[in-house]
Structures are given as C-alpha cells and as structure tokens.
Amino acid sequence: MAKFFGILSRFIVFCIFSTTVYTLSSTEGGPCSTTNDHLDGETHKLITDCTDKFFCSGIVNGTCKPKQCRRDEFPFGYGHKEPVPPLCPRGTFCPDEGSGCVPWLSVGKPCQLNRDEQCIPPPGFRRNANYSLESSSGSICLNSTCLYANGTAGLPCKIENTTYTEYDSTMLKVVLNVVRDNCKDPDFYCDPGILICEHTVGIGLPCSFDRNCRSHHCKGGFCADPPDTSLKVAPWQYAVTALLIVAAMIAICAILTLLHQRHRLERSKEVRDYYNEQISLRQAIIALHSAAADGHTDEKAFKRSVDRVR
C-alpha cells in the first residue's frame, strides 16, 4: 500500500508540474521573449514562452504567433481535424521554434540538438524523404555544429554524449545515454579514448557500447542483431516446414481413412448381428407354430380313437 501511495504521489506531482508549465505558457497574441527559450533538462525538448502551436516573434516585446511550418508528419499539440502548418520543401528545414522554413546550413554553422536534417549534405550525397539520424555518409549535427559524417579509419573524430531522462510505468526515472559521432556509419565509430575513427565489429564479437557494433546493438558485451531486425528464414527451414506440412496432411488423411473403415466394420457387424437375430427369432416362431399344429392334430386323432371304442 505504501508503494502504491508513493507512485500516486509522484504521478500527482508530475501532473501538477506539467499543468503549471502549460498554464504559464502564452497562447496566440500573448507576450513572450526568445531569450527565455531553453531545452528541458530531462527530455531536451525546446521550451518557450508560447504553447506548442505558437512561436515567439522577437527577443524583446515579442508575441506568440501561429507556427509557420512543422518537421513531423503529425505534430504535437494539434487536434484530429485541426489544420496544421505545412512541411518544408527540399533544401530547407523547419527549426524547433516553427518560425518558418530555413535553407540548409553549411558545415560549421550552428544547428539544433539532434537535427541532422538542418545540415546540408556533402556533394554527391542524396538524402531520401525518410532521412535517418544514423548518417551513412551524409551530414550530422554534432555538439550544435554541422559536420560531415564521413570519417574513416585513422581520422580524428568528435563525440556527442546526450543523456535523456524519462519515466517508466511506476513513475521512476529511466536514464538513457545516446552517443553519436561523425565517423562514417555503419563501418566506423569514434573511439572515445583517443577520438579516432575505428572499424566497427560484426555480430557475435565483443563490444563496449552500441556504437561499437555495425548493428548498433551491444547486448551482454557482444554485438547482436537490433530488436527491429526482421527474422531471416533459411531455405532448408522452408523445405523442412513444407515436408512436415505434407507429412501431417498425409497422416491426417490416413487416420481419417482408418477411422472410417473401422466405423464401417462396426456398423456392418451390427447390421449382420441384427439380421441373424431376426432370422433366429423367425425360425423360433415357425418351430413354435409347427409344434402347436402337430399337437392339435394328435389331439383330434386321440378323440377319434376314443369314439370308436365306445
């Protein structure tokens, strides 16, 4: 019971804190200042004087205005049928504030945390629509600076270590460390001890952290397939499965045939016994009738003999 009340109290404090923060934020037309913009210490989400659907228009005496763009397909804070701001066209990006589309940033320019798509890709690199934060040879926002993520073995590299804090189902804090670097992924990683790009290792080999593995998943000190890896079935497994299915179908047909034959034999025996019983009963009735007829004839003959004697 004490554990339950402890969880309940933490949940109530969390709700009160969230409600207080939202209440202090301004809606459309409310006063704001971009000098108050900051990242949440736990989630690293951008916190401003405005609510989720608005951005602050200025440093001094600013007002909250509707956001002019969005970075996500389904932005946070909007209702089911509520109109949302547009996505930015290719060659531009939407900053965390949502103040409007901005051209890609060149190498060395400041960028926002975990926003690799803000950086211009290197020459010859084609960025697809579903841009991944795991850059293979593109650009990356590292330590708030745009860099090319194309470091190979022996080249110097940089590391960004970000700590995120979230809450589990019991409202206890869960800490997650995300380490990123500007080495070419997935073949290389940045050694944190010497800050030099090294070769990543394959499945089953020893590892120290996720980035050490080509699969980005270090489990129990060894590289393993990531949790979202699709299951690969070998051809011989397909063949064995098909043979087992055919064998099962044959076995089922054979069992059904045997059961049917057994049922037919039992039914035939029942019918044969029934007819034998009927024949036996008929023969008994005929014998009884014959005996009765013979008895009646003998009685009449005896009476005639008595009449003659008289």
Image (tube, rainbow, N blue to C red):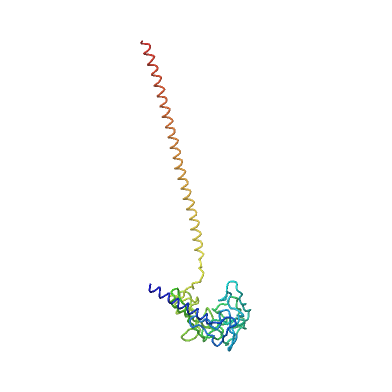
Residue 211, position as x, y percentages in the image: 49, 79
Picture quarter containing residue 274? top left
* Camera-nearest residue between 151 and 9: 9
Q: Position of residue 53 (x, y in %)?
A: 58, 79
Q: Relative to residue 265, is residue 142 drawn left or right?
A: right
**In the image, residue 279 above or below residue 252:** above
Work out which residue is located at the far bottom of the displayed protein and give it: 60
Q: Quadrant of residue 11?
A: bottom left
Q: Is residue 290 left or right of residue 103?
A: left
Q: Quadrant of residue 145?
A: bottom right
The correct choice, above or below, for 283 with respect to 108 in the image is: above
Query: Image quadrant for the C terminus?
Result: top left
How many numbered callouts? 0
Residue 272 position, x and y percent, is 45, 37
Instruction: Name, please, the residue furthest toward the top.
Output: 310
Q: Quadrant of the N terminus?
A: bottom left
| Front-most of residues 48 and 306 | 48
Image position, residue 158 (x, y; %): 51, 86
Of 285 and 258, which appears nearest the observer? Answer: 285
